[in-house]
Image (cartoon, helix red, strand yellow):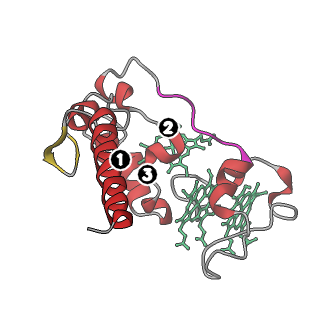
Amino acid sequence: MQPHIKRAFTLLAIAIIVFIVIRSLVVPDSFGQYGWYRGDSVVDNRNFPVEYAGSASCGEENCHKTLYSIWEDSRHKTVNCETCHGPSEKHVSNVRIMPQPANESRDFCGLCHFRQTARPEDFSQIDPETHGQNLRCAYCHNPHKPWFV
Ligand code: HEC
Ligand code: HEC
Ligand code: HEC
């Protein structure tokens, strides 16, 4: 074999060995246990505390049933209770723990409703400078049934 080819093969062999050594050091042990990912991540994810209860649990008997059915018929039916009220799993499992108050600021409603050219034309948007006289949005709009001005 020509010496320059020999050198190239030696370098290639060294590169492969270095790759294998580094890979064995940095790849976590549980990688590939179930598939092309870290097996321990299943346990890690399972251990995350559950923060959200879901809108349906707000509408249970003896809870916010009336409010829930109003919301369900409204144009806000795609905006879940916890989008505005914050994660409420603790409140659902123990009603003595109050959820944090809903965010009522103009800026919060504005996250979805302040006019942005990038949004679809037919999505309900307003100009914050001229709309609502700088009052809280809920002063005029019912957040649970927004077309009730
Ligand atoms: C778009 C945001 C938004 C959504 C969605 C929303 N809320 Fe509210 N909610 C508010 C705001 C803002 C207030 C405070 C109202 C006020 O000051 O008039 C409030 C008040 C409340 C109150 C206390 C006052 C009352 O009317 O009894 C309850 C209870 C409540 N919401 C439950 C719910 C439930 C249950 C859902 C889902 C079915 C929900 N909310 C969905 C924004 C929202
Ligand atoms: C996460 C996004 C989101 C947030 C936050 C939000 N909305 Fe909405 N809102 C929507 C969607 C989606 C609709 C339905 C729009 C449609 O069908 O064109 C809607 C509809 C409305 C409408 C009805 C418009 C119409 O033409 O009938 C009003 C009024 C309204 N929202 C006010 C509010 C107010 C007040 C708040 C704050 C308390 C708020 N929204 C917070 C997403 C949001
Ligand atoms: C002083 C009362 C008042 C306040 C405060 C107010 N609105 Fe309105 N809003 C109205 C009235 C009245 C209409 C219907 C007439 C119109 O389109 O201007 C309306 C219409 C809307 C619409 C429907 C617009 C459309 O063309 O589809 C949206 C969305 C809306 N408001 C969101 C908001 C948001 C978000 C806030 C807070 C930043 C807010 N409003 C504050 C009175 C108010």
Residues under numbered marks 3 and 2 in contact, where contact means CB atoms less than 8 Å apart: no
The answer to which quarter of the image holds residue 141 is bottom right
Mark 3 C-beta to ligand 1 under 8 Å: yes
The answer to which quarter of the image holds residue 26 is top left
Please tell me whether residue 129 is drawn above or below residue 54 in the rendered image.
Answer: below
Residues under numbered marks 3 and 1 in contact, where contact means CB atoms less than 8 Å apart: yes
Label 1 – label 2 distance at C-alpha: 11 Å
The mark nearer the N terminus, 1 or 2, is 1
Please tell me whether residue 34 is drawn above or below residue 147 in the rendered image.
Answer: above
Question: Element under label 1?
Answer: helix
Front-most of 101 and 111?
111
Label 3 – label 1 distance at C-alpha: 6 Å
Residue picked out by circle 1: 55
Q: Position of residue 39 (x, y in %)?
A: 19, 38
The answer to which quarter of the image holds residue 94 is top left
Front-most of 67 and 118?
118
Q: Residue at x 29, y 38 (%)?
A: 21
Label 3 – label 2 distance at C-alpha: 10 Å
Q: Which residues fall within the magenta stretch?
A: 99-106
Residue picked out by circle 2: 86
Q: Is residue 33 left or right of residue 103?
A: left
The mark nearer the N terminus, 3 or 1, is 1
Residue picked out by circle 3: 80
Crowding at dot 1, Cα within 10 Å, few <14 / some 14-19 / many 20+, comes out as: some
Mark 1 C-beta to ligand 1 under 8 Å: yes
Question: Element under label 2?
Answer: loop
